[in-house]
Image (spheres, grey):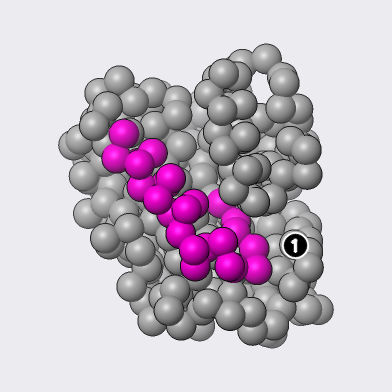
Amino acid sequence: MTILKASGRILKNTRFLLEKNKDWDGPFFFIQGADTQLGLMYNYGSNGQDGHQYPDSNWDQELELCRIAVQKMNAMDPKPAFFIVCGDLVDAFPDKYPDIRSRQEADYKKVFSSLDPAIPLLCVCGNHDIGNSPTHQTIQRYTQNFGDDYFYFAFQGVFFIVLNSQFYEDHSNVQDLYEAHESWLKEVLDMEERKKAKHTIIFHHIPWFLERADEPDQYFNINYELRMEKLNQFYDAGIRKIFCGHYHRNAGGFFNDLEVVVTSAIGCQIGPDQHGMRIVNVKEDSIEHQYYALMDFPTNVKL
């Protein structure tokens, strides 16, 4: 399986083109993962302690976890509509350790090349993928390797939006790209085809909040003032599900009836959760989801 790369802000794979997916065509499910982050467990420590320092690095632990994830997904019947990784694909920052990152990226692509071709792999950029303070160069590097840093696609009457959440954390070096991102987002939310979709689901890396929309600012969420502005924008557009990663623990909560779902990592765990992924079951009138540890991942999903 090769990664499906968006270009021109859309997935051009025929399976996900909007014109072929305007109408509801029955329930389906997809798998959301986050923070494969090859290299973190060695350099940060498997639970955030006793890590090593770059340039010393090793990512054998994450590769084994990714192999298990691939084996579990390949054994599923029926197959998921797609598998999406919500950011921090690998650990080494592109602006600090480009050579190490290149090796991590190559191994990431290699391990997921064993994923069944019937399960498309989609990628979302995280802070480790474009840097905590992204630049034109780091974003260009990401897009060359993994496709557009934000885009939309559709499947069986459901509309999906992938955002670059690092713009909401720090766009000081890329003000022009941030403004283009926000202009594009407004245009997409205003699309009549999107408004007619059965659901609209958003993916990005950094959560708006971890438990409560009014919680204090911290490293793992977005600034309160901007958070409330964007949550209101999404809510008014009819968005009711946003899936994120970044926290390396399961969390989430509601803004009115808009749910922010924070999914723990395939890789390094910082809290009590097990390495795992989330199954998202999309029905005509609801979207249900459940996180499963890799070792307990089911092979069958009832639609």
Q: Is residue 223 above or below residue 279?
A: above
Residue 205 image point, x, y percent: 52, 41
Tally of marks: 1
Q: Is residue 150 above or below residue 116?
A: above
Residue 274 image point, x, y percent: 73, 47
Q: Which residues are magenta?
A: 179-202
> Crowding near pointer 1: few (<14 within 10 Å), some, many (20+)?
some
Q: Is residue 254 above or below residue 44?
A: below
Residue 287 image point, x, y percent: 75, 62
Q: Is residue 270 left or right of residue 62?
A: right
Determine if the magenta segment contains residue 131: no
Q: Is residue 252 above or below residue 142?
A: above
Looking at the rendered structure, the secondary structure element under dot 1 is strand
Determine if the magenta segment contains residue 199: yes
* Residue kind at label 1, given as amino acid type: Ile
Q: Residue furthest top?
A: 216
Q: Main secondary structure of the magenta part?
A: helix
Q: Quadrant of residue 175?
A: top left
Residue at 52 percent of width and 77 percent of height: 22
Q: Where does the N terminus fall, quadrant-wise?
A: bottom left
Residue at 51 percent of width and 79 percent of height: 21
* Residue on which disc 1 sits: 287
